[in-house]
Image (tube, rainbow, N blue to C red):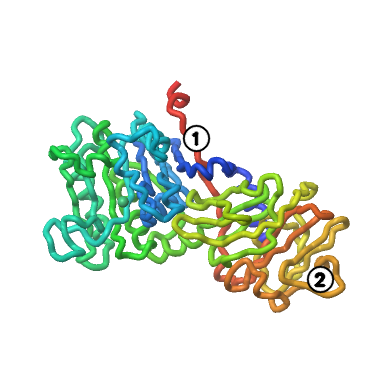
Amino acid sequence: MLDHQLIGVMRFFFLLFVILISATQLLAADFSFYQQQSKQQGPTLLVIGGVDGDEPGGFHAAATLVTRYQIQRGNLWIVPNLNFKSILERQRGNMNLKFASISRQDPQYQQVQQIKKIITQPQVDLVLNLHDGSGFYHPQRINSQRNPNRWGQSCVIDQSNLEGVQFGDLKHLAEVIIQQLNAKVPAKDQNFLLKNMHTATYQEDIPAKKSLSYFAVRNQKPALAVESSKTHPVYLRTYYHLLALEATMQQMGIHFTRDFQLTPMGVKQIIKDDAVLALASGRIQLELNNMRTTINNFPLPKTDPMEFTTNNPLITLLPTDNRYRIHYGNNRLAFINPQFVDLDRSIDSIEIAIDGMLQPVSFGSIVPVEKSFLVKEQKGYRVQVVGFAKPGHASDGHLPISHAQMKQRYSIDKAGQLYRVEIYRNERFSGMILVDFRPQSTKKEPLIARTPPVSFDSDEQHN
Ligand SMILES: [Zn+2]
């Protein structure tokens, strides 16, 4: 039981470290920028996901670097959601055609200028750009899905070699990555192949000349792109991207650890699990996996309802009419119908007997319950267990409540296993705890955001 209590406390405190994202930033849909600088000197890899908004394999892989990897030697810089606006709109967005020239009036102008600044930082040794490509690339035309104009399952370079820089032997690097990828590909017809664009040799203005990768190369930064095939489900594309990322880091001498199994099923699981949203200054935490499509009467602070923290850079909250919608990459999750409240900050936790064991539980916790729970009544506070109503009681405190007594349609999740316990002081909202009736097997470790994003300002950095 102590473990449960600890998890609750940890969840609460780690969330406090996460940088708050303000509503104005959200609406501008800026990308996030993470720098994992290790204590041991080594090269720096810049990973970019989501230059095309409708290629989730790439941006989920980049986000997984943020949520699940730690760097022991060298440095990993990550922009997981470059074209975040298009990601949220589930559109390509055409940003990757704007790296040769872009008008100041272009709505993507700021983002393109910012990423150019990051790419050209002296510290960056290699740029890896993650895409999901159509069909299967093949140097000869086999059929409509497998030919030179397709991109899927390829490693793309603009030229074989970039003279005078470390990791400039792009062809060799791509070949090593491909070899490691293909060792894990289950069938030969899904093998990755090298696609050398020979971009510089073209007289005409081919699209490759306008791309992010070629911008990097023109600025003496070795760059390559990995394209997982869109014929695969997203988790499998993400898996291939992560294999390519690990192969790249190994080649560069960047040492890392991760806390999950790099298998297709392991990746599928973390894409589902790595989705937590905290609201009301961490007094509420929602697990987004398998969430209902609409959550009603949900307490949000009157003053700043959109203020949130999350463990995952692909998650955001957007206003829509009189409610809010949670987005996770290309996925549109629940609508929240708000009940605007004033916050009560007089307490941060409440005592709950979970399966008979009394313990303090921090607001924002998700607590596993096997049989029943009982929220201890505290003078001056009202307990509201959403989905439980006993006639004649003003407060749901001091009542043992089992799963069977809950009305399923009030659960947070579609399976009817996750319920809200809300605490109020008069009409002010003190905090929420989720009680979790899922079988023990599905209980997970607390999610934390290890690497808060940094704001990028090149001038400041090099003073
Ligand atoms: Zn793409």
In primary-sequence order, the first of circles 2 and 1 is 2
Figure quadrant of residue 276:
bottom right
Kind of residue at badge 1? Ser
Q: Considering depth in this image, is 163 or 202 the residue closer to the camera?
A: 202
Q: Nearer the viewer, residue 422 or 109?
A: 109
The image quadrant of residue 398 is bottom right
Q: Residue at x 59, y 48 (%)?
A: 309
Residue in the picture at 15% in, 66% down: 143
Point out the frontmost of discs 2 and 1: 1
Q: What's the amino acid at mark 2?
A: Leu
Q: CA distance from mark 2 to mark 1?
A: 48 Å
Mark 2–mark 1 contact, CB under 8 Å?
Answer: no
Q: Quadrant of residue 241?
A: bottom left
Q: Does residue 301 appear in the picture of this structure?
A: yes
Can you identify the residue that label 2 sits on? Answer: 399
Q: Secondary structure at mark 1?
A: loop
Please indicate whether residue 103 sits to the left or right of residue 307 in the image: left
Query: What is the x, y in percent for residue 183?
Result: 25, 60
> Does 319 sit above or below residue 461?
below
Residue located at (44% from left, 50% from top): 63
**Residue highlighted by disc 1:** 455
For image coordinates 83% across by 65% down, the residue present is 395
